[in-house]
Amino acid sequence: MRKTIILLLALVFMVPTAHAKEVEIQAGVFGGTLYQLSYAFSELMKSYAPNMKATTVETPGSAAGIIKMSAKPDTRIAAATYVTVLEAVKGRPPFKKAFTDLKVLGNFTKNIQTLITLDANIRELNDLTGKRLGLGPKPTVIGKNHWSIIEKGCKDPGSIKAFYMKWGGLKDALMDGSIDAMVMGVSTRKSGNWASVPIFKEIVASRGNPHFIPIPEHAIKAAATADDIDYPPMMLPKDAIGPGLPSADTMAWSEKLALFANSQFSEDAAYTIVKVLYEHGTEMVKQTPVARGVWPELVADIHVPEDMIHPGALKYYKEKGLR
């Protein structure tokens, strides 16, 4: 009898166990909206998709994330902006080749990109003449593309000294006066106050409300034409973030942040990821206030041809009657 039990136990341990599928999310700059949402989503997956282990990996920006993802397309996905993905599909710098097999899974949020300053003498783009401007790392939308728009709205963009750095560096530089203005990302929200990146609260607490610098709509449209990329103009409403933030309606431009995968990525895994994001994405607010900008209708608000949507994601959307 004892020998029989030992034999049975041996057979049990010899049976191969199923391993959770490991997925890396290439998440962008640490502290940025993409990184925060990616981390919150990886935590959400622990509860609703325990058969999948999602980890968050920092990258210098969306472009680097797309390149890293494409090196291991079966185990990596990327949190990125549509602007960067469209540039990747076309093979534009910093991409050395066209990444034509990129597919969208679902949207995280919709951001507004604008500028802030603590200098009372800076009220419009032309006031930045001869000033120091803080932008995101060059490969990112808040570095490369944002500058493209800004230079179209200034009389003398060549006189502006641009500094490219991460959010923490931007915050410190603005507060100690090393730069005169900086980029600012704000996530829209279905209802209630909109959510800025976390470092914004530190700026307000330390130095008071900054001024939001409007970006002329003609500059946004001129940059879109020159770059052959859609930069949708969007108004940041007065008091959208909080009382006096901004102090008046402020023209800016918008972009959607989303999860993307290569066509080689598992359809079943893509289906699971989209299901969790669509059905439980609002719970990510437990990890970061930036997730206030996540809601089901926005997750599925995808305006690209169906062949650019990952088959696993498309299957879920069709089952839900969303496509």
Image: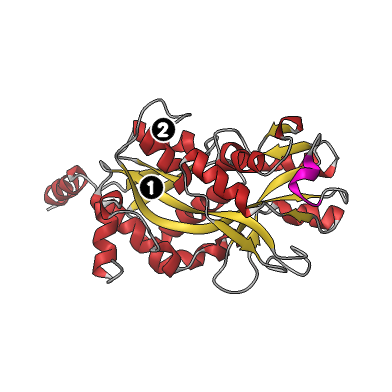
Q: Amino acid at mark 2?
A: Ile
Q: Amino acid at mark 1?
A: Phe
Question: Is 124 colored magenta in this rendering?
Answer: yes
The image quarter in which residue 51 lies:
bottom left
Disc 1 target residue: 260
| Relative height, residue 7 to residue 294 (above, below) | above
Q: Nearer the viewer, residue 198 or 62?
A: 62
Q: Start and end of the magenta stretch?
A: 123-128
| Relative height, residue 130 to residue 11 (above, below) | above
Q: Does any portion of residue 323 appear in the rendered image?
A: yes
- Residue drawn at (49%, 50%) of the image: 38
Question: Is 271 colored magenta in this rendering?
Answer: no
Q: How is the image coloured?
A: secondary structure
Q: Position of residue 245 (x, y in %)?
A: 75, 64
Label 1 element class = strand
- Residue drawn at (47%, 56%) of the image: 41
Q: For this view, does 197 lie left or right of residue 103? A: right
Q: For this view, does 140 lie left or right of residue 195? A: left
Q: Residue furthest top?
A: 96
